[in-house]
Image (tube, rainbow, N blue to C red):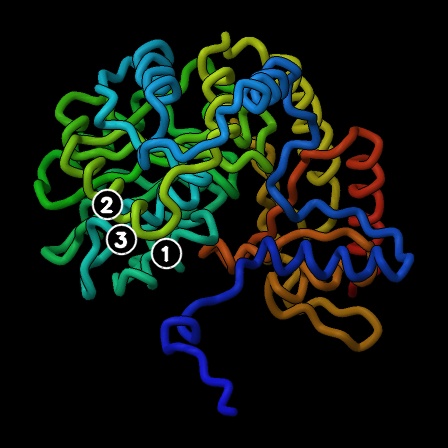
Amino acid sequence: MEHTTSDLLQRLSESATIAMARKARELKNQGIDVISLSLGEPDFDTPAEMKQAGIDAIEANETHYTPVPGTPRIRKAIVEKFKRDNGLEYTMDQVVVSTGAKQSLANVVLSLVNPGDEVILPAPYWVSYEEIVKVAGGIPVVLPTSIDNDYKIQPSELEAAITSKTRMVMYSSPCNPSGSVYTEAETAALADVLRKHDRVITVSDEIYELINFTDKHASMAAQPGMWERTVTVNGVSKGFAMTGWRLGYIGAPTWIAAACTKIQGQFTSAPSSITQAASAAALEADPALVSDMVDAFRRRRALMVEGLSQVPGFKVNQPMGAFYVFPDVSALFGKSFQGKSLNNANDVAFYLLEEAKVASVSGAAFGTPECIRLSYAAADDVLAEAVRRIDAACRQLS
């Protein structure tokens, strides 16, 4: 029997975060003490209110199919959340609930991007953006940034990247992997560029909205003239520690929401009815419910930035959101240990795994090959030990 897979599958890369997490698990299963800072998952439990809402839904027999875009309750909760937190006005038919924000993003791209369309990806970008664009036959156009400007694109750079083939711009703020947050003024400046291009749809990934160390979260769709050309993506996984519940959502103009509902109807239909009930409770709650978690991440950020800034070859900035640090490690390229040279960020990530027993992710997976990503979604003492190990490993390079 011939074991032949599709050309599409061959074009796709495996998720680097999942691959590194798998490698770390394999080492742990061998009894090796590995500290895994590779996956983007809060190390907190789902709040009791959300868990109880899920239990209540089971006991009330809310275990049947729901409308493809979500139950009336959760879509109403999302509409009210957008208005309360983001100053955005949507109706229920402009909201689509999906099995995680990753599916929300895929729905949008598959609904809007044709083969040959260009999609601008400010780098660093989340690993799946590029692969989702490839699935649709689109052409990823990587727009590089650097640590010197906190990994943010400038309006002039965005303008220069837009062509007649540009269909979409996808970005996240707070950003995975850099932790960068676009301010209100910076968002407005990018909006000034985007408003000039009627064919370009902006996908604003705001999944880390609640883990934001600035004074205010800025939504692109709230900028004048941007609502009708923006899709806002969000979810409950990061802000409410509900990764395993799998629920994301979009707010979008009616024609885009209807397109995403049609796509989703042929793939998964609606998310779990139980998940929708628990997530509705999260969105109906005061965001201050998770303030303790955010405070913990703020404290851990300080620990990581201070510690990694002392590591030879690491250049570290101050991330303003999410729970990642994204150091530039290019100063380590060309160094070696016991005859093994580090030529790129992939080499650095695997060196740290092998020698420091700390799992990270190469920045190459995020379109920024001079960096690595480290998650600080771990206990303070674990992070302190990880920094100690990384420092010791880097000091033995020559």
Asked if the residue at tag 2 contacts the one at tag 1, i.e. Cβ–Cβ closer than 8 Å, the answer is no
- The residue depicted at 65 percent of the width and 44 percent of the height is 374
- The residue depicted at 18 percent of the width and 45 percent of the height is 159
Q: Quadrant of residue 103?
A: top left
The quarter in which the C terminus is drawn is: bottom right
Q: Is the residue marked by circle 3 packed among few (<14), some (14-19), or many (20+) residues within 10 Å?
A: some
Q: Say whether disc 1 or disc 2 marks the residue closer to the N-terminus.
A: 1
User: SS at mark 1?
Assistant: helix
Horizontally, residue 24 falls left or right of residue 241, namely right
Mark 1 vs mark 2, foreground winner is 2
Q: Position of residue 155 (x, y in %)?
A: 24, 38
Q: CA distance from mark 3 to mark 1?
A: 8 Å
Asked if the residue at tag 2 contacts the one at tag 3, i.e. Cβ–Cβ closer than 8 Å, the answer is no
Q: Amino acid at mark 3?
A: Leu
- The residue depicted at 44 percent of the width and 41 percent of the height is 151
Mark 3 vs mark 1, foreground winner is 3
Question: Does 121 appear above or below 180?
Answer: below
Circle 1 residue: 132
Horizontally, residue 290 falls left or right of residue 128, namely right
Visible in this render: residue 174?
Answer: no
State the residue in front, 303 or 171. 171
Q: Is the residue marked by circle 2 packed among few (<14), some (14-19), or many (20+) residues within 10 Å?
A: some
Q: Which mark is residue 262?
A: 2
User: SS at mark 2?
Assistant: helix
Q: Say whether disc 3 or disc 1 marks the residue closer to the N-terminus.
A: 3
Circle 3 residue: 110
- The residue depicted at 43 percent of the width and 75 percent of the height is 10
